[in-house]
Amino acid sequence: MNIFYTTLLFLIMSMIANAQQLPKEPIPSGLESHDRGISREIEALNHQLRHDPSYRPIPKIQRKQNGEAGLGIHDMPDTACVQIIPIVFHVFHPKGEAGVPLAQLEYAIEDLNRTFAGTDADFGTVNPVFKNTKSYSKIRFALAKRDPYGKPTNGVMYYQDRQGGFGNIGPSWENQIRTYAWDNYKYFNVYVQNDIYANNVFNNSGVCWYPSTWMSDNDIARMVYNYVYLGKGGSSYNYLEFNQTFTHEVGHYLDLRHTFEGSSCTGAGDLCDDTPPTDIAAAGCDATRCNGIINGENYMDYNTACYKNFTIDQVARMDAAMKHPGRSTLWQPSNLVATGLLSPNSKDTCLDSPFISYSTQHLRESLNNDGSLDGGSIIIYASNGAKFGMKGKTLITGEHYSPIELPDGLKENIAVSDDGTFATMTISGKALKHASNDTKASLTFTLFEEAFAEGVDKAIVNMSTQLRLEFRDPWKKTCVDTYVRASADTTWNLFELQGPFPRYYGMWKNNEVYAIENYGRGFITESAMSSKVVFLEPGTVIGPDNTWNQGGAPIVLHGPEHTALDGQTGYVGFRIQVGDAFHYGWMRMAISATNGCTLLEYQYNEKPNEGIAAGADCAIALSAEEQVMVESFTIKPNPTNDNIMIDFKSDMPIGGAFVIHSMTGIEMKRIALEQSLQEISLQDLATGMYVISLIDHAGHRIRSQSIIKH
Ligand SMILES: [Zn+2]
């Protein structure tokens, strides 16, 4: 499989391990990852072993001797009752579901379950040397059917983005990742991308981390996996044996090490006694290493042509990992109800004790941003023999449940159904304080035995739980003055959006082309299939009705094929997707074929799915309809070879000044504001492009424009 990619675009080189990993300067040549990312995967896992503050490996499985408790030599797992882990796929593909169809993802899950169940056909062809050690598991996987807010889902979130890079480590990447994550204690989050390290290498297969409460607490526990090696059909290359690399990554999720861990014949290796030591990766399916035949067909080696088996010790390690606090919540029956994988009325004989489950434990403030909760209801199920008393009545606080510390302004009501199988908690009213830092991350809710009908012989296992009430800051715009440019001297400049949705972009120059690296996120271009950016008239509403570039190529500001914007400063529309909503914004760009392209300012609307007016003044709030474009001043002539006249269109700020910067940010001139029609000499400046900014008395930039000196 010699997989070689070239793109029109340019490569961002690999990053240095352990440093905060940011996309680097693009280089204009092809590059292939010969090992499909193997060294990067090992690097990521080793990094976790060294730096994850919560990581504690599952200890080596102890074999029993002479009747001791432990694992016997030939103990096969009891698979009468399976344990199911809910999965959510976050799929980043410019064509969304058409690119990575549901059937492709479903095949991946089915195949994963075959490998865990030992029912894949080649399990029967494992080298007979290992016939007494090869094993299978009672762990299974399923696409979630309910999202964190209790709403129906098919377990897949599609994004119209070419977004990559979630295989990287470091706070900046993690800030992005957690804006997509679903509760890590309820879902196994799998990010499906093509360029998993954002280095324009499209044939890295995948990476996944060991169990870690630190990662789960931070919403960054994850697998990141390439859709070309996933499942069957759609974007998959259909290398079905190789594609069981997906099973390999899940092995890491359940704390399995590589069989070649430590690259030594004598070290601790993978902490499993029944996988013979091997000192190199991918030695071969039936190779001899360290004076013996290795289990090269093991899922945790790298022999991708013969992925066939786990061993008894590996399965025992995974069973132990299922009890790790970062994994143990996933497969509990209450979580399977919450994620839609188990009926709350199930009589499954594998269910042990009666339990309580919730349609959701996470309520968000409504989009009205008035302190009320979206939906505001939580269904509380009494399952597996439990039943509420007070049928058709309302539960009483202090008698049937402990008082809930709801924020002022909210009130709960818990009404039991007529048959006692469930109760509906409705939280009504409007919280008086409802900024994001008023969020109640874990609100304790405890039911008392008095809430339940008698006659159940086993105690209910989970009478207490945590609810989460999430509030949002008042809707506003993120408004940032900046200075990011690409020029002959500076061919690559990375920047990250400030505000609640951190996202990387880059300004770059290659040959005669100036572009914005957008990582596939949407921009307004000449047409959906065009990468040529257009300038929008001030006041133009940027929103769902515009024509959006369909992710993929960087957006071209200037090039031999795109000269329409030369010598101008204008507004470029962009959008970012968060969950199933878009946030709209604009960037103000100065474009010059000779002097480079500069990002001067940007804004985006923090309210989902609401437009924003190009060039809106940040001080003017909220809805696009209310926004008025204020051109603070005009410059004539521009270009100039001598003096310019500056004319105010609005009130001149008292105590302000004009500041002229070079395109590399050096202050060249500062002129105090004296009169509304002001003349400034540029005679002493070298020819080229400059930025002239109006600042107020406190030094804050009010508005900037570019000017060209001939
Ligand atoms: Zn691995």
Image (cartoon, rainbow, N blue to C red):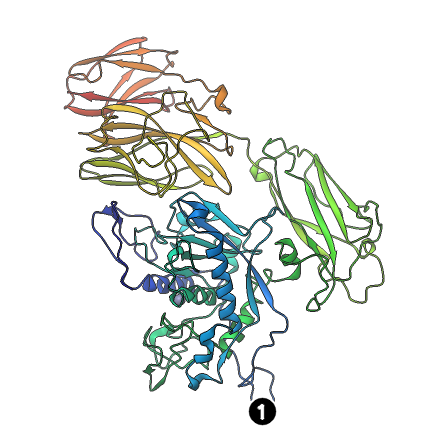
**Residue 155 versus residue 323: which sits nearer the camera?**
155
What is the residue that sits farthest to the bottom in this orientation? 66
Looking at the picture, how far across and down is residue 481, in whole percent? 36, 29
- Amino acid type, label 1: Asn
Q: Does the residue labelled 1 lie within 8 Å of ligand 1?
A: no
Local crowd at mark 1 within 10 Å, few (<14), some, or many (≥20)? Answer: few
Residue 125 appears left or right of 200: right
On screen, 139 above or below 537? below
Position of the N terminus by quadrant? bottom left
Q: How many labels does the image show?
A: 1
Above or below, comparing residue 695 to residue 28 in the picture? above
Where is the C terminus found, in terms of image quarters?
top left
> Which percent across, then down, holds residue 189?
50, 55
Q: Nearer the viewer, residue 524 or 668?
A: 524
In the image: residue 89, left or right of residue 614:
right
How far from the left and from the top, in percent, is residue 316? 53, 75
- Percent of width and height locating residue 208: 43, 61
> Residue 221: in sight, yes or no?
no
Question: Residue placed at 43% from the left, 60% from the top?
Answer: 232
In the image, residue 340 above or below residue 580: below
Q: Tell me, yes or no, if residue 44 can be seen here.
A: yes
Q: Is mark 1 on a helix, strand or loop?
A: loop
- Quadrant of residue 573 within the rendered picture: top left
Report which residue position mark 1 lands on: 66
Residue at screen point 58% across, 67% down: 323
* Displayed-image quarter of ligand 1: bottom left
Quarter of image, res 662: top left
Residue occupying the point 46% across, 47% down: 97
